[in-house]
Amino acid sequence: MAGILVYALTNEGAINKNSLGAVSQAAKLAGELGTEAHAVVVGNVDDAVAGSLGEYGAAKVFRAKDAPEGVSTPAVDVLAKLFADNDYDYAIFGGGLLGFEIGAGLAARIGAGITAEVTGVKVEGGKLVAQRPILGDSLISESNYKGKGVLIGRTNAFEATQSGSAASVEDITVDLSPQAGKVRLVKRGEQRGADINIEDANVLVAGGRGLGAAEGFQLAEDLAAAFGGGAAVGATRAVVDAGWFPYAGQIGQTGKTVAPKLYVAAGISGAIQHKVGMQGSENIIAINKDANAPIFEFSDLGIVGDVQKVMPALTEAVKAKKGS
Amino acid sequence: MKIAVLVKEVPDAAVEKRIDASGRLDRSGEKNLNPYDTHAIEAAVQLKEGGTIPVEEIVAITAGPAGAERALHKAVSLGADRSVLLSDDAVAGSDVIATGYALAKLLERESPDLVLLGQQSDDGENYTIGAVVGEFLGYPSLTQVVKLDIAGETITAERQAEYGYDTVEIDLPAVISVGDAINEPRYPSLKAIMGAKKKPLEKITIADAGIEADKVGAAGSKIECGNFTEPPKKSGGTIIEDEDTSATVEQIVAWLDERKLI
Ligand SMILES: Cc1cc2nc3c(=O)[nH]c(=O)nc-3n(C[C@H](O)[C@H](O)[C@H](O)COP(=O)(O)OP(=O)(O)OC[C@H]3O[C@@H](n4cnc5c(N)ncnc54)[C@H](O)[C@@H]3O)c2cc1C
Ligand SMILES: Nc1ncnc2c1ncn2[C@@H]1O[C@H](COP(=O)(O)O)[C@@H](O)[C@H]1O
């Protein structure tokens, strides 16, 4: 059967939101193609959890209980076997880090074409055409597949919609490849730094490498404090990786997705992986000393200036306004 | 141990990237070594200098047009010992899979113990070449690594995935793409820049590498890209150049006030 297979990423028994989006997207496309979308989970995922993928449109769910979840190669083995057994035409991934790795490995293994960062998919002449932004999001390019295709969605590009009911779950066993044993997950999902809440904030002051050092985050804390209750501080991956700010406060592809009323980006370049986590914010102010920084392309108010000068003055001005 | 670093020449960050009439990236402007790849070279050099394991050689490898020699010179000035350039018209227009296949063939000639790459190419933005190369070589692979320790035949790597930081063990030989937070690449010394052109640079064709012509180039690719369109632009925001900071913040506060955000 030609159809679409979706890899559903799981962690601690829960399915990733972007994977649910990929299942919904695949189900919609399968409908247009006159075929079915199936999903696969790797690891010992609960019956009810695996079956719930049916609610998002999967006609059938496979589960490879014995394959380890969290690294790519075992999942590539599982998906490659399902492709061999069921002759799918396409695989769709919700993105994220593992989606990129598994999708790329699968495409190489089965000789499929691959498109990363997919933001839209359409059906043309009975085939899928993937759309993705290129060159710093300045153009949209369309990928036409000569044969089988792997589509890796951009974070938050596919919306999860509940349509159907629970699907049946079929357990499969897969002989893992020699390289699968050569990658071993030692620790998964370690949270570094304090547990902070940024998702409920209505004002978010986010800091990037432009704050200069961990101490620079005081500027962001002060501005957030000036806005008062409901304001919080967030960060980019660059500064979380550098240990300047807790992981729980990271916004973007491998962090949180936020949509506050006001987002202040301080010393943030506006990389795509950051943008996907905050572009839904109602109002975006960016402060950056580089007039060419990509962040200015999607901010409502852009300040070309030094955070060290602008932030303290802005904090005082906000305090004064609040006090008046 | 032998380390191969995959590097790419890309349009300089300051150049506005465009698609040319043939539907490919316009590569006519100023070019540079992909900045993300300098982190991969630095990681290799730090392993060599670190001394926990002896590193005999660091080889920089690229598939690209003849001009990509400059990127290899830069890679050598940053610490690679020699370099290999696959430059063959047959490879032009390759997609991710065709590029990964060609690079895997180049790597087979070298049989390195460790292959390092950048997290992304500035022009391709695919994040996928590492996993593709690993698959073709039958090596385990890992992307986005920001910490890397080697003991014997095993690397312990850390990276941020979708639920936090993961620690992963991976056996050599392996393919690892490094995140840009892994290190702060050094600037090459004047002596290293001058010396780079004297280090061996091997130019090869697809025949030399045993690359099958029908698996590379536009014809050997699995996708065709086209129909380029401009995305809907978010209506341009207001820009304030901060010259007089008190005036700037006054404007910001007025803007916030207007939108009832304060
Ligand atoms: C798979 C993957 C997942 C990722 N996930 C995420 C994610 O979840 N979240 C995320 O944020 N990133 C993520 N990234 C990383 C992302 O690509 C960028 O590297 C990161 O967002 C850059 O952070 P930054 O803006 O703080 O740093 P930079 O890009 O270094 O930008 C710093 C900015 O500060 C400006 N600046 C410097 N000094 C000053 C000053 N004194 N005053 C004003 N401005 C100044 C500079 O002009 C520059 O624009 C991911 C990348 C990959 C490949
Ligand atoms: N043509 C090429 N030659 C050598 N290395 C490449 C080439 N294309 C990509 N790479 C490597 O693959 C990494 C990821 O690129 P990409 O998957 O295109 O984002 C880059 O940082 C390079 O290290």
Image (cartoon, coloured by chain):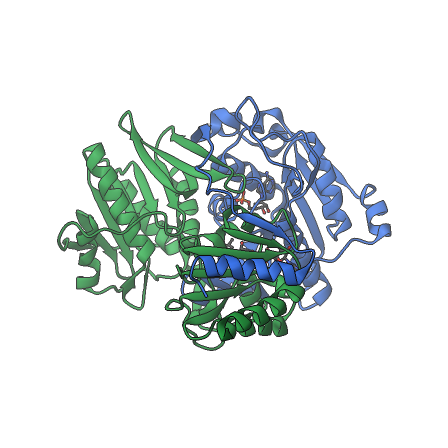
Q: Nearer the viewer, residue A3 or A109?
A: A3
Q: Nearer the viewer, residue A140 or B23?
A: A140
Up-down: is A192 above or below B233?
below
Up-down: is A56 above or below A83?
below
Up-down: is A270 above or below B10?
below
Estimate the x, y position of residue A277 in percent, counting from the top left: 43, 56
Q: Quadrant of residue A149?
A: top left
Residue A175 visible from this viewpoint: no
Numbered-mark total: 0
Q: Quadrant of residue A74?
A: bottom left
**Residue name at image x 58 percent, y 66 percent:** A314
Q: In the figure, the blue chain has which letter? A: B
Ligand 2 quadrant? top right
In the picture as drawn, the residue positioned furthest to the top comes out as B21
Estimate the x, y position of residue A222 in percent, counting from the top left: 55, 74
Left or right: where does residue B34 sit relative to residue A321? right
Left or right: where does residue A120 sit relative to residue B192? left
Q: Nearer the viewer, residue A263 or A267?
A: A263
Left or right: where does residue B134 sit relative to residue A18? right
- Quadrant of the drawing holding the N terminus of chain A: top left
Up-down: is A208 above or below B128?
below
Q: Quadrant of residue A255?
A: bottom left
Estimate the x, y position of residue A251 in percent, counting from the top left: 46, 61
Q: In the figure, the green chain has which letter? A: A
Residue A134 visible from this viewpoint: yes
In the picture as drawn, the residue positioned furthest to the front comes out as A324
**Residue name at image x 51 percent, y 51 percent:** A299
Estimate the x, y position of residue A217 in percent, counting from the top left: 58, 71
In the picture as drawn, the residue positioned furthest to the bottom comes out as A194
Left or right: where does residue B104 sit relative to residue A253? right
